[in-house]
Amino acid sequence: MRLALGTAQFGLNYGIANQAGQVMRSEAQAMLQLAHLKGIDTLDTAIAYGESETCLGEIGTQYFKVVTKLPIMPDDCLNVMEWVEDQINLSLKRLGANSLYAVLLHRPIQLQQEKGQQLFQALQYLKSIGKTQKIGISIYAPDELDALIPHYSFDLIQAPFNLVDRRLHTSGWLHRLKQQGVEIHTRSAFLQGLLLMAPTAIPAKFLPWNQLWHTWHEWLLHQAISPLYASLAFPLSFPEIDRVVVGADSVQQLEQIIQASKVDLPRSFPEIFCSEENLINPARWSYL
């Protein structure tokens, strides 16, 4: 199973299409049970995801490989090693775990700053003492790799990748990372739910891309397939991708995603890729 379960919804009211709010503990527990039953072996969380780690710790993560992310290191941090260790020890305590599968940097740009080398050495130390199997970064755009890969070696990289945002592939980084033996996780397969919305439900601020939505929904109609199936099939069609991180608001939604991942891949996909940051980077949406 190449799906990984994203758990931001377990700790936050997350996602533009999320109408249910933060997932209740009982629902989260049922979702983890379903994930384990269906062969999902990886959970994606972050220290910055509100109560997500605490929720996972209460439920239990013994059947899963857990990937978490360090938050932004404070500018006035005097002891980088101590700060990183403290963050991860607290993370392990919340998760009720002895070790992690991977620790990623949520803001890898800090590796290019004054204390970047110290930050990377702290990650390497975590790995050397068995607190984590792998270290890496979570990026927003592949051009971050242009500046970092020549200077740092990563075990795992997480990046956005979907029918609209194909930069990881078009930049050549998807192929290069796999050649270097890096584990690749992609997120935002549904563009935070935008790709799953009916045309009439798409928020007005995304109307400047009306032609893109028209092409997408016309293609779906012509192919007679669901947006969920097509959106998921796209990243799964790239063998270089080890895990596709998906979020869900309920057991029913997760069941639908798992079923959609098992359907045969379509032979082609619609030409709806876009390079405009205001659309492909959710961090920019609040400014639209």
Image: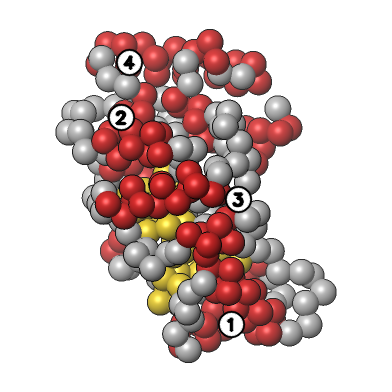
**Mark 1: amino acid:** Ala
Q: Nearer the viewer, mark 1 or mark 3?
A: 3
Residue 62 — which label? none
- Reading the image, the residue beneath label 1 is 122
Secondary structure at badge 1 equals helix
Question: Mark 3 or mark 1, which is nearer the start of the sequence?
Answer: 3
Is 218 left or right of 9, judged from the image as shown? left
Q: Which mark is residue 229?
A: 2
Q: Which residue is pictured at 79% across the width and 70% down the height?
A: 75
In percent of width and height, residue 101 lies at 41, 70
Query: Real-space Cα distance between discs 4 and 1?
Result: 48 Å
Label 1, residues with CA under 10 Å away: few <14, some 14-19, many ≥20: some
Q: Is residue 115 visible?
A: yes
Horizontal side of 205 relative to 214 (left or right) equals right
**Where 120 sits versus 217, above or below?**
below
Q: Which quarter of the figure is the C terminus placed in?
A: top right
Of all residues shown, which one is farthest toward the right? Answer: 76
Q: Tell whether label 2 touches label 3 (CB within 8 Å).
A: no
Q: Are marks 1 and 3 in contact (CB under 8 Å)?
A: no
Residue type for callout 2: Tyr
Q: Residue at x 34, y 64 (%)?
A: 63
